[in-house]
Image (cartoon, grey):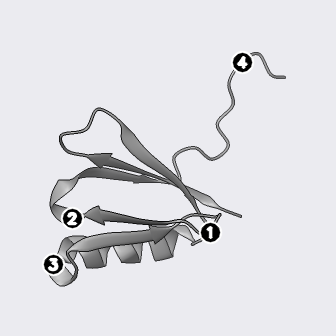
């Protein structure tokens, strides 16, 4: 099971969307460590093995797991 992580980056019109194999709790731990001043970069790996490095000073917001169980259209 993967969790969706969306990262808003300042001075950018688009957000970074990653499907991570980490649990929500582990993603939160990585984010808290980076934003707590322990790291200069937030490092996440997606479900395909690609690594993303985001400078902590450029992070506007982070949404974890927002896309789960979202239905669109006329379902019954």
33 versus 24 height, above or below: below
Image point 63% across, 47% down: which residue?
Answer: 68
Q: Is residue 31 visible?
A: no
Among numbered discs 1 and 2, the one appearing first in the sequence: 1
Q: Is residue 15 visible?
A: yes
Disc 2 to disc 3, C-alpha distance:
9 Å
Q: Quadrant of residue 42?
A: bottom left
* Residue at image mark 2: 56
**Mark 4 in CB contact with mark 3 (< 8 angstroms):** no
Give the crowd class for mark 2: few <14, some 14-19, many >=20 residues within 10 Å: some
**Mark 4 in CB contact with mark 2 (< 8 angstroms):** no
Percent x, y of residue 73: 72, 18
- Of the pair 73 and 19, the residue shown nearer to us: 19
Q: Would you say 31 lies left or right of 5 here?
A: left
Q: Nearer the viewer, mark 4 or mark 3?
A: 3
Q: What element does badge 1 sit on?
A: loop
Q: Nearer the viewer, mark 4 or mark 2?
A: 2
Any mark on residue 73, and which?
A: 4
- Give the quadrant of the C terminus: top right
Q: Quadrant of residue 13?
A: top left
State how many labels appear: 4
* Residue at image mark 3: 37
Disc 1 to disc 2, C-alpha distance:
21 Å
């Amino acid at each position: 099971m993967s969790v969706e992580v969306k990262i808003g980056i300042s001075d950018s019109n688009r957000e970074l969307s990653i499907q991570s194999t980490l649990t929500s709790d582990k993603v939160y731990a990585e984010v808290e460590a980076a934003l707590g001043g322990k790291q200069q970069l937030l490092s996440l790996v997606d479900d395909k093995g690609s690594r993303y490095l985001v400078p902590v000073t450029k992070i506007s917001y982070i949404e974890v797991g927002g896309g789960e169980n979202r239905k669109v259209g006329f379902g019954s």
